[in-house]
Amino acid sequence: MHFNLFVVPFTAGMLILAILLAVRYIKWLSDLEAGNRNEIGGNLFTIKTLYAIREVFMESLLHRKVFKTNPLLGYMHMSLAFGWFLLIVVGKLETFFYTGKFANKFYYPVFFRFFEPTPHKSSLLLAFNALMDFVLLVVLSGIVIAILRRFRPRIAGMKKITKHSPGDRLALIALWLIFPLRLLSESATAGYSGNGSFMTQSVGNFMALFLPVHQLAIVFWWMYSISLGLFMVSIPFSRYMHIPTEILLIFLRNWGIKTKDHFSGFSEIEIQSCSRCGICIDTCQMNSQGKNSTTQMVYFLRDYRYNQLRPDLTDNCLLCGRCNEACPVGIDLTQHRLLQRKKKEFEIPSGFKYLPVNQPVEKKDVIYFAGCMSHLSPVISRSMEKIFKTAKISYLFLDKNGSVCCGRPLKISGQFEAAQKLVASNRQQIIASGAKILVTSCPICYKSFKEDYHLNIRVLHHSEYLLELMLQKKLALHPSGKKVVYHDPCELGRGSDIYIQPRMLLSHFMELVTIDQEKENALCCGGSLGNLSINPEERNAIQMATAGYLNSVDPEIIATSCPMCKKSIAQFSATPVKDIAELVVANLEALSESQKSLKHHKVGQTIEI
Amino acid sequence: MKDWGYSILKGRQIDFENNDFSIAEYITKHEPSFRWCIGCGSCTATCSAARLTDFNPRKLKLLIQRGEIKGLADEIAKCMLCGKCQLVCPRGINTRNVIQNIKRALNTCHAL
Amino acid sequence: MAINSQHIVIIGGGPAGLEAASCLGTAGYRVTVLEKEKQTGGKLLIWDKLFPEFRNSDKVLNHLSNGFKTNPPQILTNAEVVSVIPENGQHRINLSDGQAFQADTVLITTGFKLYNAEKKEEYGYQIYENVITSFDLEKQLKTGNPIRIEAGLTPRRIAFIHCVGSRDIKSGNIYCSRTCCITGVKQAIEIKRRLPDAEVFNFYMDLRMFGQNFEELYIEAQQKWGVTFIRGRVSEIAENKDNSLQLKAEDTLSGRPIKMSFDLVVLLAGMVPEPRTVEIGKSAALEFTSGNFLAGLDSHISQNETNTPGIFIAGTCREPLSVAETLTDARAATVKMISWLRENETSHKKSLIKRDND
């Protein structure tokens, strides 16, 4: 009995969507690796599933993370997502209470007001009616904000928003039309039947004054159904695929699955979870300082998904990780960019036959690896050597005469296999030395050792190691009162989660000032080896901006713990930029003024005339 | 190419007019800074690979510009992509992107 | 005595400023020279011998002061200028201590500063003991004492590194500093003169022997003194246990990397504008070159005039120049200044001028 031809577009759309979704879900789940499937099985009945459900609620519906970026932006996304969710759930409840049964025709709750023109009598149902109107109002307010934001992104705290492809724009329009059309449909029906609530009834009464609402209503219901159907059908092909995908992603991620060093079934799911919200555009320094707004993750993922990736897009990313932090869906964006760089044809692993194998190595408990970059900043390794001496540590400076690169620069250019050859060479040396601790003053090397070397010994970044030495009282540092600001290197901070150790070390003997963009929000120095194709002007612009930002708090010294950051920032900073090892040594030397051998006495002072 | 009969000297001279510049053109198109090199040698001086084997980035790029590309694929494979050359280059050449584009050029326009 | 009431202020009492003061004074103008240090003479004070004929810098200094016999300028030392501001057709020159001067025309001759070689940290200046700059060496040479390295020993092998802070985008200076190459050759010869048994190596990218007798000096360095020239830019310097220095360069002409140890390394640091010059220039709304030197109006016809009428520039504040070129430049500036002053005399001032009919 409850049927009208207009329900067909909607129902057909839902059916098509359901089939396509099922096909895709089945493909994805079967594409998952065996290891991942075990993880699902092992974690399905644990608390992790509850965490997943909570995350779906907090992120997919309430958009908690987006609120952190900007409250109005968060409200905009939440009103649509959570609002629509509530319309469905509350609508279903309303029909349950009305009909007394759960199983009604599939489309019945969607077009409920059409099929039940009689106004409610019970206060419970009237309350549901009002609640439905309220939620619809919330959704409509979100759509108004969304439309306004297209013209003035600033109202939602954004500078740039995603430039959508034509297909996405069509889907967007379909989506935006759904709720106004629902309002018009329900209001028109309320206009002749009186079954609306505070909003729909008022609009309906207004319409009834001068419009033939009885005839018009059916037109609106048709349009409503068509826009719903169109939207449903567009989901698998547009950015809105993120709606069903993200939910699956959250569960899989909570069960411990992630994208590692090769593209897997899970990676495909991650990529299709991107909603193209565009939040990654503003956080990207290539955009804010480099004037490049075509290379951000939103475009990268889109082009990847539709097989339109250009190599310059894949290469042109600093891999700084700022977008990872901002992404509301929590996609491991930089890992995907990295994986797309893997192209077999550029890999020539056979080129490294010249690497030393089985070279005799001195046996020591502690090894220090300076890394390639540090050789161009000799004061860092020199400071480390002085520190080792002061703390009376017996150590081996493994790459004193020059480094075999740790392998990470090669890896992040996409040449995983070739990088393994470098890893093997260094690894053999490290193991042969019998060392128990490996200390490096370069965050790039540190990340490489931690992720790719599979060493069974302690691997420490020098900030961790120096902190340890200090806490063990092997280094006597005293407060100097100098004002210092600390710059988090990308590979150490976001890349390896080491934020606190350098700060604990520095604040012990200097006045550490905090800045807004620090720790997870730290700016990238711009030096990044991760970006192969950036042009010098853009890179300089980023370096200059970061140096300027650090200087804006008027520090006496800018401290960092990476030779690349040091060089990048120092190029554009009048304030001295020093590595933490240098600062430690300066502090130690100031303490022991009598040690003449450490004083720098120049032959023939340069006279400043 | 006239055959003077001095075949023993044939490989010695840079036969500019008959050399293969496809790789140089490819690189210049994608990384224009390739043209800025003055041959100062800082890149080779600091190169991590040059310390261990007969690898000379300056010479490599020069030969490509002269159209001498025989054996290029084997040579370019030696680069560790460590980035020291880029840090010292006084002309600000994006040396790592030059290396990447050499590899791409070898694969797209040349089967060497 | 000044025969003209127009007042000229010259900012900077180095060779350019003093030469200009002497020319303008001889022409009868009232000149004030403001020098920020406690004596005039600029870099000539620390320089020992000038290329290419190894003339004593004192000789040039004497010539400069000889020019003040007829109409000496008022010279104020410890006078640091912070800004130059146009005021009622004249210029107001403000000093750091609050003093101010009025001038009808201003000549900026604030000179250059040596590139801070500390910034090129891979060379280890101020990190390694035996890495010095050309200025440090010149000061050593001027004392006449034997050349020594830090430990009091005589260096047996010395390296000169050309283009430190010049022609180097990483230092922020793309331009060539012009005089460092010839200085490198000059100092190489001077070391060989004092230490005939020492080995001297010059590491260069190019050898810019542009001036008269420069190429001849280069030939002399090779032929008579046995200086070795290696074409290869040094990428980094490491320190050995005995404080000697290990250089990494590529011997580009042989196509192979080279590794050598030296007792002493001399960095031929380039010229950068004095920081004060930038401040003063900005206050007077002057234009700057891409290297941040003061810009003249035209590179052929009018190098000493600026975009602000009445403000002139001369010497190394506008581009790297040798001492000889600086003096010529200062004289050229004065010609322009005199003709500008004559055009811009006001009728009020005209009545005060006693024409010199000689």
Image (cartoon, rainbow, N blue to C red):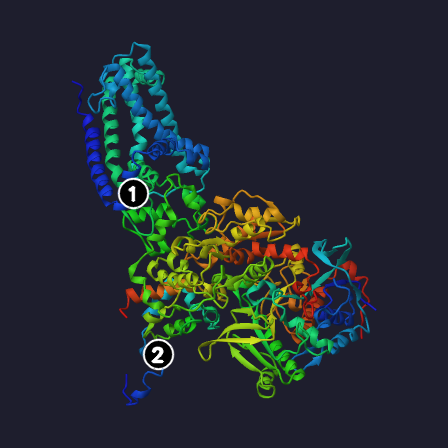
**Left or right: residue C40 compared with residue C295:** right
* Image x and y of residue A147, in percent: 38, 34
Residue in the image at 48% along x and 70% along y: B42
**Can residue B31 be seen in this snapshot?**
no
Graded by Cα atoms within 10 Å as few (under 14), some (14 to 19) or many (20 or more), the crowding at tag 2 reads few
- What residue is rendered at 25% in x and 28% in y? A223
Q: Is residue A293 left or right of residue C133?
A: left
Q: Secondary structure at mark 1?
A: helix
Position of residue C159 relative to residue A224, above or below, is below
Residue A269: give its label.
Answer: 1
Position of residue A500 relative to residue C31, above or below, is above
A403 left or right of C207 in image: left
Q: CA separation, marks 1 and 2?
A: 53 Å
- The amino acid marked with disc number 2 is Phe
Hey, what amino acid is under mark 1?
Ile
Label 1 vs label 2, nearer the camera? 1
Question: In front: A20, or A278?
Answer: A20
Q: Position of residue C286 (x, y in %)?
A: 63, 58
Would you identify the image quadrant in which residue C238 lies?
bottom right
Snapshot quadrant of residue C200: bottom right
Residue under pointer 2: B16
